[in-house]
Structure formats: structure tokens, C-alpha cells
Amino acid sequence: MALVWALMTGSKYGYSLLGLCLFVQLFSGGVLLHNHSNLSYYYYIINQKRTVGDSLSFAYDLVNNSLIPIPFVSVQMDLSRDLTRMELTEEGFYFKSLQLFKRNMEVPCSRRGHYKLGKMHARIKDPFGFFEIDKTFERTIDLMIYPKRYDLDAIQITPSELFGSVQMDSPVYEDYTNIKDIRSYQNGDTFKNVHWKLSAKMNQLMMKTYELNANPKIHLVLDGCHAAYKEDTDHLIEEALVSIATSICYFTLQKNIETTLESSFKRDNQVTYRKSKSIQMYPSFLSDLVYFRPLGATAMSQFIFHESRKWHYGTRLVLLTPNPSHKLIDDLAPLRMRKIKVSIITISQSQETIQDLINYGLAMGVDLYPAPLNKIDQLWEAIG
């Protein structure tokens, strides 16, 4: 407007006003850029390893290193919606020269995972409100949130119950991972034990014999199909199932029970598969569970069809899924022919629906254990 008036009137007063307006804007812009370059940020976190359900404490300092105050600055912490459901609002204030703005915050951890915490956005305005500029601080710290683990050592688990113990009832079977000897064919030998390469070389049937094993084996299968979790919009069921898997893995590895963790979830294009009987390997199991996300496209019935042939004779199979069904029980029932004892752990649905599935599972030889959401400790009371 000052430019139009100056051109129309041609007066010195008009051009003086125009010059004053330009000077004020240039001054405001210069102050804004100066404040932008003199704004510093420092971030602190008290504990970089937390557990779902814990509170996370952190602090940040924002410093105006300039002698010129900032008329208005607003800050907004960039927190992942997966990490916490707590809303952090934008905070605006007047920033004096050489002032330190310090904030201590505490948020609840709602979902496990690996996060980068500490990124912050600042919005700065000039003294006259003509201009606005954003500044993003990328100073971040790695944060690991682990799944909640329940203590099973205090739970009474008998050999006839789920998981069992080191004395659990387990039939003697051939361990196909340990070859004991190779010998000539004898009447009655099964052809599945033929050593075909050696037989071709020696021009006679040679048989592999395996070590006999009666040690208990636990095979955990965590449902990683995205469609099974379509109603779990807040990830509560997902977190509960992962917590149960974490608790079982820790308990069985402590007892030196051979434990296998498997899921259709792919990490770095590799399907989740982990096996060990040593508690020293627990961090590796824990890492798989921390990064677990139900993003797979393979339904559990299809997964069982392709993978069950690899499961050892005499194994205790524990399937964790949010969506059990009659068809799933039908798919699991034939595993009894290989002395595989099958148990399903799920999160409670309606009482009528879950009781019908429990009764059907009993008839088919498949145990079904429902866990009340947010009361997982009651599951151990039902099992133990």
C-alpha cells in the first residue's frame, strides 16, 4: 500500500513512508534470521531401555544465545504415536535474551519397538509479526522399548499342564537333527530314513539312524497375519500376545528347554525363526519380539499347512493368535498323530464365543486358553 501511495502521489512523504516500511521489514527479517541461527537445543533421556507400561522421563533445554529477545517461539516435540498415546501440545512463549528454557516431561510407553526420540520443531516469529520461520532440531537418542514380561517362576506348572517343566511327559522319539549312525537296510526300516546320496554311491540302501530324545521341546508360533489384527486398532491385543510369548520364552530358556519361536512376520526379508535351549540366547528372542509387527499376508491355516511338516515329533506346540476359529482347530488336530500336543493362547472374546471354541477344542484334542485383556496374569492362574 505504501508503494502504491508513493507512486500515485509522488510526494517525499510517501516515499519516506515506503522507505520506512521496507526498513522495518528488512530489520524484522534480519532479526528473525539472527534469532534462528542463535537458537540452540539440548536433549536428555534418563533411561534408554524401558518396558511397555513404564513411564519414560526426558528433558530438553532450549537456549536463546542472542542478545536480542525472541518475541514469539513455539516448540513441539516429535513423539511417535506408536511410542505413546499421550498428546503433547505445542507450547509458545516469549524468549528473553540469553534465556534458558527447560522442560522435564514424562510419558507412558504404550508399544514396544526401537525409536529415535528427541526430534523437535520450533516456530519463530519476528518482532512485528511479518514473518515466520520453522527450525527442526534433529538431535535424537536411540530408545528401546521391550515387551512386558511376567514372572512365571512363581506359577505352579505341573507336567500335565501347558508348557510343562523339565519333568514334563514327553515320548521318546528320533531327533532328526542328530544322526547317530549309518548302516545297511534291514527289513522293516522306513524309507524316510534312507541316505540317498550314500546309497547311490555304494549301490545299496544305507539307512540313517538318529539319536533318541525325550527332552521337552516348546514350539511357539506367533500369528503375524495382518488380517487377524484388523480390529486391534490400538495394538493392545498385539502387545498382550507378545508379552505372553516373551514370558514363555524366558521361562523355558531358564529351564534349558529347547524353545523355538516362529512367525510369518518378516524382518529384513527373513521370516522370524529362532531356536535355542540356552538362556544366553534370550536377548536374541527378545529382539525378534521387540521388532515383531503383524504385517504378514499369510493366514495362520496356510502357515500351518506349509510349516507343520518341519515340526518335531513330540513337540509341545503353543500357538498365540488373536483370532482362533473352528477351522484353525481343525487344521491343528491332525498334529496329534505325530504326538504333538497343541495349545492355543488367545485374548478373550465374548464369553459365549470363546466357551464354544474351548469345548470344540477339547473334543478335537486342542487346548484353548483365553487371556483377559489387560489382566494377563490371570492366564497363568488358569494354566498353572
Image (tube, rainbow, N blue to C red):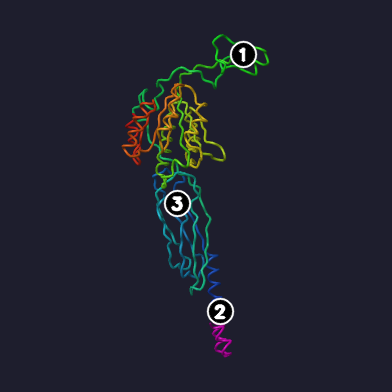
**Percent x, y for residue 12?**
57, 90
Q: Are marks 3 and 2 in contact (CB under 8 Å)?
A: no
**Percent x, y for residue 216?**
44, 23
> For the residue labelled by badge 3, is the local secondary structure a helix, a strand or a loop?
loop
Question: What residue appears at the point 43 percent right and 20 percent down from the top-left corner?
Answer: 170
Residue 184 drawn in magenta = no
Q: Earlier in the sequence, mark 1 or mark 3?
A: 3
Residue 7 drawn in magenta = yes
| Total labels drawn | 3
Residue segment shown in magenta: 1-22
Mark 3 and mark 2: span between their CA atoms?
44 Å
* Mark 3 surroundings within 10 Å by alpha-carbon count, few (fewer than 14), some (14 through 19), many (20 or more): few
Q: Are marks 1 and 2 in contact (CB under 8 Å)?
A: no
Residue behind mark 2: 23
State the residue in front, 247 or 72: 247
Question: Residue 328 falls in which quadrant of the image?
Answer: top left
* Mark 1 surroundings within 10 Å by alpha-carbon count, few (fewer than 14), some (14 through 19), many (20 or more): many
* Residue 382 badge: none
Q: Nearer the viewer, mark 1 or mark 2?
A: 1
Question: What residue appears at the point 42 percent right and 36 percent down from the top-left corner?
Answer: 321
Question: Residue 220 falls in which quadrant of the image?
Answer: top left
**Percent x, y for residue 280?**
49, 31
Mark 1 and mark 2: span between their CA atoms?
97 Å
Residue behind mark 3: 81
Question: Residue 162 falls in which quadrant of the image?
Answer: top left
* Residue 206 badge: 1
